[in-house]
Image (cartoon, helix red, strand yellow):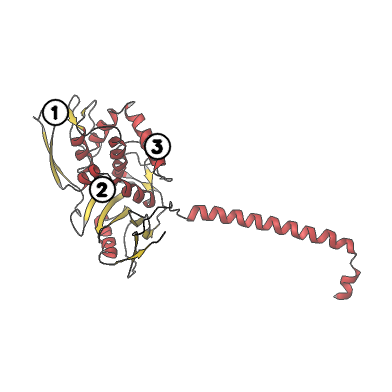
Amino acid sequence: MKKLLKKVPPRVYFIFLPLCLFFLCIFLFIAVSFLQIWLKQNTIFITPFKVSKEAKIPIIKTEFVPVISAKSAIIMDADSKVVLYSKNPGLKGSTASTAKIMTALTALDYFQLSDTLLVKEATDAGSILGLVAGEKMTFENLLYAMLLPSANDAALVISENYPGEEQAFVKAMNEKAKVLELKDTHYADPAGLVDEGDYTTPFDMARLASFAIQNPTFKKIVGTKEKVIWDETGSLTYDLTNLNILLGIDGVNGVKTGYTEEAGQVLVTSKIEKGKTIIIIVMGSADRFMDTAKLLDLVSNNLTFLSIHP
């Protein structure tokens, strides 16, 4: 072999070695490019957060894998946005009526609770309160109607009374989604009826819920089991019941149900565990309450806390 190498002219080395290095660089460039694409598709990025000297991050003490029917799910600490459990957390799916969480937040940025809104047109799409054209109701009562029995007509009335009406309101919803860094979320209507246009991921939904539950008005309403509301004249009253049957059980204080045939059953849950707010999301579920109950078991009396020192 050594004799053979000696017969190779020196100029061949000057040609061969640079070519080898050139092809090696191309290979590494392609490999890094594919790795970047893979990471982008399979990594969930958590926005950095500020913590105080007393900040404590929860972790699960005894881990077990709950068997749930949901296609995707997540458990997140509301304060730190730390993910405690996940199943396909980046899988996109229809929001169904959980879109009304964003509808509420967007509307709360503009309307006052005492504002009187006009029913410009009635709708019979899906779950409704039964509002009729010309009827007037306070924004606060419409929020209760939208978030407890998930009345689609209440969501429509809110959007129609926004400057520019429904189209402008939906645009504002998507702008707010960008502000909250919900990178895989989009809204097509205020009620969540357009499956192909209303989509999100468990990760984005958990982020949204963690911000929403910080709003005192929103938190109060989604934590209400029953409510009687009325129109402006007081002659028409409506008895409302929250669709979330887990409310008040095991520290659950919200948040919102959702369902369409395409979306399956969706549930956004907020739970207080040792003074911490924990967000649980299930999407594409065959039994959202059973799935959520299993995830509640995973965190109930099963969290320990790590102190974070900046």
First in sequence, mark 1 or 3: give its number. 3
Residue holding disc 2 = 257
Query: Residue 179: x percent and y percent?
Result: 40, 41
Q: Are marks 1 and 3 in contact (CB under 8 Å)?
A: no
Q: Is residue 62 left or right of residue 131?
A: right
- Against 287, residue 198 (above or below) is above
Q: Quadrant of the N terminus?
A: bottom right
User: Of the numbered discs in the image, which one, if any, rests on residue 232?
Assistant: 1
Residue holding disc 3 = 175
Q: Amino acid at mark 2?
A: Thr
Q: Amino acid at mark 1?
A: Glu
Cα–Cα gap, marks 1 and 3 = 32 Å
First in sequence, mark 1 or 2: give its number. 1
> Which residue is depicted at the point 34% across and 56% down?
76
Q: Amino acid at mark 3?
A: Glu
Considering the numbered disc 3 on the image, is that residue within a helix, a strand or a loop? Answer: helix
The crowd level at tag 2 (other Cα within 10 Å; few <14, some 14-19, many 20+) is: many
Cα–Cα gap, marks 3 and 2 = 23 Å
The crowd level at tag 1 (other Cα within 10 Å; few <14, some 14-19, many 20+) is: some
